[in-house]
Amino acid sequence: MKPALPTLLLLSLAYTAGRSPQLPAGSLRSLAAAGEAASYTTPWADSSRLGDTVFHSTGRVITTVAVQTDSHWVVRPPISETHVGLPSGPSQLPPDSLCALGYTATTLPVVPKNVLVDLDRTHKCHAGTFVQIRRGKLKNSDGNLSVDDALKEISQWPWDELCARVKDSTILGFHIGDDVVSKEWGPAPIETRLAQWDSIAGGVAARCPGAPIVVRARPRQLAKRDHWEFLTTAWAQYPGPLPRSGTPGEFFAAEVASAKKQHLGLVTGVNLLGGGCGPAETGRCLPNIPGTSLKGSGKKTYQLSATEFIEYKTAAMNDPYVCASVDWGWGPQFKSNFHSRPEIQEAAKALGQIASKRKRASCVQR
């Protein structure tokens, strides 16, 4: 009988690392008489390092030529070895682009058959992501928000593997909803809808206890619910210098204060593709922060100028309470050249340096 390939591989890794499998003292029983299978067994255990991953295995030696593996698991390195500074980047960035563009955070809609491959690519780029429930999977046949449909969707996710990637910080949190106070989700009163979001968060918490669970809504919007039982984290995105928003410093200070009051962690971000003040004639630009005439992703919106990008994003990352900063959104999805603009690439490098020096906060503040 020949050993199975995975066992041979593990043994080979162990010897390559200069170690032999940890077998008990004594010799294995000789093969029995010709044609008779040996019955002597002895346990073994070993671990080997390959790159930044440690492989552990245990099993039983059945004969001098047969090994059966009882268990095989992986321990990835702690956060300090792979992730430095504040996770930062645009949302919905394909994993393969994380390394190319140098960002350290994004979002990833979960397609069960693809998600583990995408997470492995993210991990190799020393980045993290907020995995999210696909928008359409949150709705019933009437197009309204449905707790039952959301729970049915996440029941198909590979939870053991996902929770392991929370522990190594490849998954920064579970992103369960977007624009959560929008009328898109149905006619239910806002208090009822917020309770529904908390129930969906409860489904995630039951499968991966202790993981950050996020909705992309400002803390001041979420304050209409008295107590969040399962939701852990809010998400404040600066919409641009509109009259109701104020300066980025004022905006984020108010949202941090609200998040602290509700004991919610906080992700921040800026609207890259629709949060610009536009050309000077709009009269919306803040003093000494010029905009650009480049059209945004929505009607009568503008992309950020490089100066706006640096000013708004620096404010978003400024408070030590912030646990990550992820912006809306990734240019090519909206036929935008935002990330290919040379001045934006230079601004992104400068912002990356700021993020790298920021101490990481927890997205769970309870």
Image (cartoon, grey):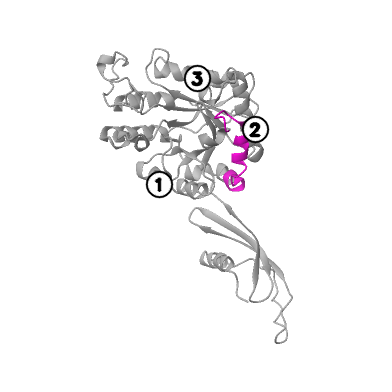
Residue 250, position as x, y percentages in the image:
43, 16
Of mark 2 and mark 1, the one earlier in the sequence is 1
Q: Nearer the viewer, residue 236 or 354?
A: 236
Residue interval drawn in magenta: 141-163
The numbered mark, 2 or 3, whose residue comes first in the sequence reads 2
* Eye-nearest disc, 2 or 3: 2
Q: Quadrant of residue 294?
A: top left
Quadrant that contains the C terminus: top right
Element type where label 2 sits in the image: helix
Identified by mark 1, the residue type is Asp
- Circle 1 SS class: helix
Residue 39 included in the magenta stretch of the image? no
Tell me the crowding category of disc 1: few under 14, some 14 to 19, or many 20 or more residues within 10 angstroms, Cα based: few
At label 2, the amino acid type is Gly
- The residue labelled by disc 2 is 202
- Where does label 3 land, which residue? 255
Question: Could you tell which of marks 3 and 1 lies nearer the N-terminus?
Answer: 1
Q: Position of residue 282 (x, y in %)?
A: 28, 15
Label 1 sits on residue: 96
Return the residue found at the far right. 39
Q: Is residue 25 above or below residue 205?
A: below
Which residue is depicted at the point 56% across and 42% down? 166
Q: Nearer the viewer, residue 156 or 16?
A: 156
User: Does the image show residue 361?
Assistant: yes
The Cα–Cα distance between marks 2 and 1, rounded to whole angstroms, is 31 Å
